[in-house]
Amino acid sequence: MTDQEEAALNAMGEALLLANEGRSPQAYAAGSGGTHSGTFTGTGAGRGTGAGAGAGTGTGTGTGRSADRAPGPDSLDPLATAGLDADDAQRPEPAKQSAPESGPGARTEPPPRPHDLTWPEARRAARAAGRRLPAVSRPLAGALGYALAAPLTALTDLPSFDTSAMDGWAVAGPGPWRLESRQLLAGQRPGVALLDGHAIAIATGAALPPGATAIIRNEHGRTERRTDGELLHATRGAPTPGQDVRPRAQECRGGDELLSPGVVVTPAVLGLAAAAGYDELRVITRPRVEVLVLGDELLDHGLPHAGFVRDALGPMLAPWLEALGAEVIGTRRVVDEVDALMSAIGGTTADLLITTGGTAAGPVDHVHPVLHTLGAKLLVDGVAVRPGHPMLLAELPAGGHLVGLPGNPLAAVSGVVTLVAPLLRMLAGRPVPAPYTAALTADVPGHPTDTRLVPVVFDDESAVVPLRFHGPAMLRGLATADGLAVIPPGGAVAGQETAVLDLGWGTAGC
């Protein structure tokens, strides 16, 4: 990426962040306080809370914009982080409580909780929570979907010898050429040198014999049988030196970097690695993810009836998480009992545990009490986004993480793109998807203070059309959506550019 491209990427990230926080560039540059107190420190163009520098209520110690170093494109989440570097990111911590005053009437306040973060702050917190998992070596057949842990460098020149790009004849010098009786096929040694004025039949991919200067295609030559042998004539004029030859190192030299770390291994990457001589690849371990589906009212088959509804999240989450780079080790139902949930969460060996439902404050919403009892550390407890407000992110005592998704399907989808996808990218070493914006074709009402995520489809002009069915419990709009439009607090009007999130059903998006 050029300096200009990186600067443009950073600028877009800044603009999108400001739009979704409803703040001006001037306030951003001054490190103005937000509406939540807490410490969010970063070393890039990150959002600082600027102690005492703004009119907000934030009291954190963020430094606002830093000129020390620019974030690399592989660590930038332009839609949310605005430059938080993955290697230096710090987890959001509650602001330190001031020492209590002594004497009568002394006033103490409890430390603030990481509650109701803005949508960009929540995405940033999810990225900051993750650390890249260890690297492993895997055979090519088992590396699909993993991210490269190291650069893929060429082990040899490609091609490693001069080859014919066409079926035809290899010729040496000017014609006509005396045609030799032997022929060269792919996989054969080229043998003796080709003398000047001679030609030999050759197949595509065969190594050129020493002395050959060009290839004449079958359709560009004719043979003449004579008493002293066969002659080859060119029918399209004399070939130029190197014509239809794939020269050695045309694609790369040995030692050249073919792919950077973090590139996801696709079928094309497997093909390139095989061509370059690799039998195995060094890749990042895929995060092991377990899904707990909570709710006694959920059915796993049949029609909804008499207060029971079908579980929509169990079938949807596992393949989606696999597409986002995870290894899903299980999806299981857990009854709405404290002890059952305590056992399931406390006994997990997953890098990331995902629960569905139970994150609010209802009579059977046990996620918060169980996390408190287990001694988990809440990093995000509610996000100012609609749908999906009661989502959470916690660090478990054993070192893994838990993301609590709301039980409503579209609200849970919001939780995946807000917390799960950024965290999985960090754990799996995957790159941040490139940001893009599109113009809205219609007005989209906004929440007064919260970001909205609205399913949209692209029209023929590459603008986005908001879809009708976007309630928290609805999946009808999402099933046909091309992405989620990020609508800032207050809403957006037709023609306004808005950020669009890829859902990443079959990619590393979000």
Image (cartoon, rainbow, N blue to C red):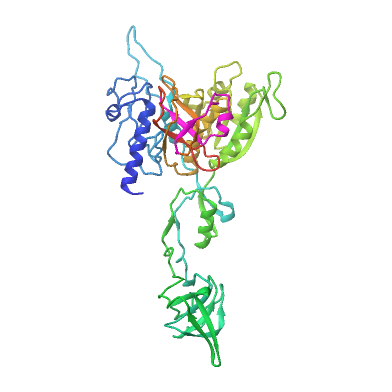
Indicate the position of residue 310 as horizontal and vertical percent values. 67, 27
Magenta residue span = 461-488
Q: Residue 185, located in which quarter of the rendered image?
A: bottom right
Q: Is residue 213 above or below residue 89?
A: below
Q: From this viewpoint, which residue is outermost toward the front?
A: 235
Q: Nearer the viewer, residue 219 or 384?
A: 219
Picture residue at 60% right of the left edge, 37% below the top: 318
- How far across and how far down the image is residue 272, in percent? 50, 58
Report if residue 118 is visible in the image. Answer: yes
Give me the residue at 50% from left, 26% from top.
392
Q: Nearer the viewer, residue 408 or 125?
A: 408
Q: Residue at x 30, y 27 (%)?
A: 24
Residue 253 shown in magenta: no
Q: Position of residue 243 (x, y in %)?
A: 43, 72
Between residue 31 and residue 453, name the one nearer to us: 453
Residue 72 location (% of width, % of height): 36, 44
The tally of labels here is 0
**Residue 418 seen in render:** no
Q: Residue furthest top?
A: 104
Instruction: In this rendered view, identify the residue nearer to me: 388 or 465.
Output: 465
